[in-house]
Image (cartoon, rainbow, N blue to C red):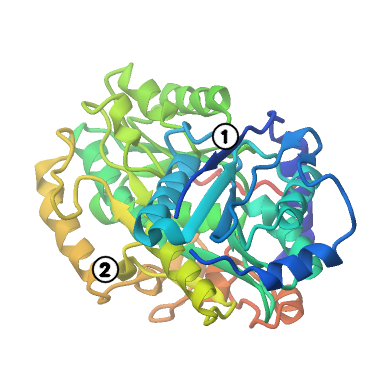
Amino acid sequence: MRNKRAWFLLTVMMVAALLLSACPAATPAPGGAPAAGEETSAATEAAPEAPAADAGGVQIPDIEEGKFNVAFVYVGPIGDGGWTYAHNQGRLYLEEQLGDQVHTAYLESVPEGADAVRVIRSLARKGFNAIFTTSFGYMDPTEEVAAEFPDIYFVHISGFKKNDTNFANLFGAMEDMKYLAGMIAGARAKADGSNRVGYIAPFPIAEVIRLGNALALGMRRTCPECEMDIRWIFTWFDPDKEREAAISLLDAGATVVVTGADTPGPVQAAGERGLYGIGYDSDNACEVDPEHCLTVPYWHWGPAYAQLVQQMMDGTFVPDDYYFDADTGIVGLLGFMEGQEPMPAVPEEVIPEVRELLAQMLAGEFDRFDIFTGPIYDNKGNLVVPEGQQLTQSDLEGIDAELGAMLGREGCTICMNWLAEGFVPDAEIPQN
């Protein structure tokens, strides 16, 4: 198995090099709680002097005195119809729930890497009490700045690093919803007399791989003869590349395209051919083509944000590896949650099975470890998870023994660096 630490460092460099740089726009949004006040002032005074309103040409939003000020750093625009849109919904939920106690602000389209360090540091200097950073490539920048400002709270989304004082990570069991989406994709392909589904994968990191594996395993549950093709695009947000990848998969015979990136463009591309797509991240992703969109595994960040910020304000916040299961409400499946109806193109025969399994997930009776219980073979025919064995959280996050020890965590035994049976046999995880 390859060295995860080296692979992670390489991945971060690839992210910084390949993401499109966009001029981030500062957009303060009034919200509504008592400021951390004296502690934040102390941290700010201890930091090196620098223009708080400028971070590489980015205008840093102001805080509001007398409130608990929370900043969000976004990798894409809030209108992406996906990942960043969902996080901004969570920010608005936070404001609604905590009212005049909090003030929130956000910066969108902030590139990962050195630019992120400057932006996060400038927000801390400005006096924000808490900073949420919402992309994998912000992990090391957030860790760096959190060490400089011990009296400010930091939460990083989708990573695995934390400390014991002021820095936590947050994610949720999206593999549950991806598994259900795979069941729907397989049922749709089978109903159409097809055996090919396509997956658009942003980066070769454990998160993307395990969600793709959950998708493939779900597909095989309803269509044992189906195969999943894959396209790596090396970006989270690039509408052109996402659309090109979808077209490539459709040209290769896929009748359903499932995206792991940030925009609903692949759903639209499939619909233009009378075929089908599955979106990702936000509950509005099917709006581009309701007739040909099957479903969307989406995030509901608001309750988690409100819970953590309330703890910060109360002085009870403890940094941790927060990985919430489906029964917390952090993830959903469009068309199958309470008060929703399945999209019109979902095959009738799969609806009861999806509903039943989702109900088990929401009741805490079926979780991500049940999905990844052996026997599981990889797409080369090798047995990777023996019968009856379940992957651990460290396995799912792909952390090896060396990096796990560095982070104070258990290393993985069956690291998530393989593609599950169901992916076409020649599919590979890029190594560089």
Residue wearing tag 1: 237
Q: Residue furthest right?
A: 48
- 254 sits to left or right of 142: left
Image check: 24 left or right of 383? right
* Image coords of residue 86 (percent x, y): 42, 45
Look at mark 2 in the image and give the residue it sits on: 361
Left or right: residue 333 compared with residue 43: left
* Kind of element beneath mark 1: loop
- Vertical side of 168 occupied by 109: above or below: above
Name the foreground residue: 408 vs 42: 42
> Is 283 located above or below residue 23 in the figure?
below
Q: Secondary structure at mark 2?
A: helix
Direction front: furthest residue: 66
Q: Quadrant of the N terminus?
A: bottom right
- Residues 221 and 168: in front is 168
| Residue found 79% across the figure and 39% down from its top | 54
Q: Amino acid at mark 2?
A: Met
Q: Position of residue 275 (x, y in %)?
A: 29, 25
Amino acid type assigned to the residue bearing label 1 in the image: Phe
Q: Which residue shows up at 69% across the image and 58% down it?
A: 127
